[in-house]
Amino acid sequence: MKVGNKEMEIKFTKAEVLKEKPAPGAKLGFGHIFTDYMLIMPYDEGKGWHDPEIKPYGNIELSPAAMCLHYGQTVFEGLKAYRTADNKVQLFRPEENFRRLNRSNERLVIPELPEELGMECLMKLLEIEKDWVPSKDGESLYIRPFIFAIDPFLGVKPGAQYYFMIILSPSGAYYESGLNPVNIYVESKYVRAVRGGMGYAKTGGNYAASLIGQDEAHKQNYSQVLWLDGVEQKYIEEVGAMNIFFVIDGKVVTPMLQGSILPGITRKSAIEVCKSKGIEVEERRITIQEIADAYDAGKLNEVFGTGTAAVISPVGHLKWNDKVMEINDNKIGRISQMLYDTMTGIQWGKIEDTFGWTVEVK
Ligand SMILES: *Cc1c(COP(=O)(O)O)cnc(C)c1O
């Protein structure tokens, strides 16, 4: 392929033996099974991205001084490949992931990865690994592209050398027993990100900052954390790895993007699906007090999270300090169900993709 004015070939190094694929029906879980191959492409200052290679999945060698290990100059993406009933493999809005990767790159002072080069690398890898896309209902092949600085140097500066990699992991259905409401804990001591920080970038540091809240939530038997803004701890931001939506008195509202929230592709798609069905969505600032007041007034109809992993995650309980709100009698709401059915329908090819969101892997 041509990138800029350079001709680029993706080198393919064959594995001597291929792994045994999980048996159909085996529990896949998330993130611990990896396919036969991975993609790796170095970047060197002055040379740019070069010599992409698809090679057997395995450990990589890094200097103990590699900059990513010390100062966290890393970014990542997450998307899935879905197998449809007629045995096609397709992606959901993958160009959005590469666009967002570059917005993360910019914030972390990592060189741009041309979108078409990222896409080409992904498509080549998937052509080879297509058979790893599982076929049971709700299962998918999780795709993890990521970039990290590898310079062996302990000074603090942006790296001059990087790796771009893609690894693939077959994953089970998020909801083993159907769409189930989750319980969420509102974190009011720690914060995840601030405006002007890197909350909008998909980078490891944001997750490192969030672990302590996740830990506290788990101790209290809640599965995920809802973060409040980093300045006043008044405004709602997002959940662990999901954006958040509320239906208040019949109206769909979600926090507006102001730089501290990850701009989810599922969030964006959910807004577009709502609009296509004539459901208005307000993107604005929402205080946790407004949610508590709406709850007390009996006007908090639905709460749900959006993200690639679960697509739509209805919230059954929301705990803010001593107040526990049970949403919609811990049942899935009408809009949550509609969004879930529409979006998973498009992803697994069960309904027509009138938005033109899917991209087939040939
Ligand atoms: C990835 C991510 C999301 C969800 O984004 P999608 O593109 O919808 O998968 C939400 N919040 C955080 C912090 C994330 O890292």
Image (cartoon, grey):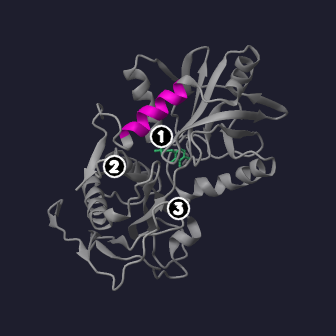
Q: Pointer 2 and pointer 1: residues touching (CB < 8 Å)?
A: no
Distance between mark 1 and mark 3 Cα atoms: 28 Å
Q: Is residue 314 left or right of residue 98?
A: right
Image position, residue 140 (x, y; %): 43, 54
Circle nearer the N terminus (2, 1):
2
Q: Nearer the viewer, residue 61 or 223?
A: 223
Q: Pointer 1 and pointer 3: residues touching (CB < 8 Å)?
A: no
Residue at which label 2 appears = 91
- Mark 1 neighbour class, 10 Å CA radius: few under 14, some 14 to 19, many 20 or more: some
Q: Nearer the viewer, residue 255 or 194?
A: 255
Q: Is mark 1 within 8 Å of ligand 1?
A: yes
Circle nearer the N terminus (1, 3):
3
Image position, residue 53 (x, y; %): 29, 74
Residue at which label 1 appears = 263
Image position, residue 184 (x, y; %): 70, 39
Residue at which label 3 appears = 28
Q: Nearer the viewer, residue 287 or 342?
A: 342
Choose top left, top right, bottom left or bottom right for residue 46. bottom left
Q: Secondary structure at mark 2?
A: strand
- Pair 1/3: label in front: 3
51 above or below 121? below
- Mark 2 neighbour class, 10 Å CA radius: few under 14, some 14 to 19, many 20 or more: many
Circle nearer the N terminus (3, 2):
3
Q: Residue at x 45, y 18 (%)?
A: 279
97 above or below 298? below
Residues in magenta? 335-346
Q: Secondary structure at mark 1?
A: loop
Kind of residue at badge 1: Pro
